[in-house]
Image (cartoon, rainbow, N blue to C red):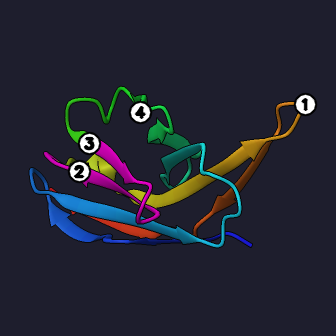
Amino acid sequence: QVQVVESGGGSAQAGGSLRLSCSFSGNSFPITFICWFRQIPGKQRELVAGGNSDGSIVYSDSAKGRFTFSRDNAKNTASLQMNSLKSEDTAVYYCNVLVRRRADGTPVDYWGRGTQVTVSS
């Protein structure tokens, strides 16, 4: 039932900035964890940043110091401010919304379709 939509992708030059947004709706439970993944062609999808409902935030080594994650629970949105972009940031970025975990620990989560980010040198 949860719909997840990413936006804000596009093209940027190295050193520039982009802001990605994730909007979601249809959730019947409070959102536990929201995170951004990215997939570079030929590589596995990797976690970029995410935030738990308790306010804790995690970043990948690549994102730390350059990207800033935020979430607005009242508006059902999450954002990823990306500064100092590098060509290696080029990827499809996906928003993942974790509604809850089952008793066995498996996630009940939902994915957006992704938004393309292209950074030129």
Helix or strand or loop: what does disc 1 sit on? Answer: loop
Disc 4 to disc 1: CB gap under 8 Å: no
The amino acid type, in three-letter code, at marker 2 is: Met
Q: Quadrant of the N terminus?
A: bottom right
The amino acid type, in three-letter code, at marker 3 is: Thr
Q: Is residue 86 left or right of residue 7?
A: left
- Going from the N terminus, do you reach mark 1 or mark 2 first? 2
Residue extent of the magenta highlight: 68-84
The crowd level at tag 2 (other Cα within 10 Å; few <14, some 14-19, many 20+) is many
| Quadrant housing residue 72 | bottom left
Disc 4 to disc 3: CB gap under 8 Å: no
* Residue occupied by mark 2: 82
Helix or strand or loop: what does disc 2 sit on? Answer: strand
Estimate the spatial distance between the alpha carbons at disc 1 and disc 2, rounded to whole Å.
Answer: 35 Å
- Going from the N terminus, do you reach mark 2 or mark 3 first? 3
* Residue occupied by mark 1: 104
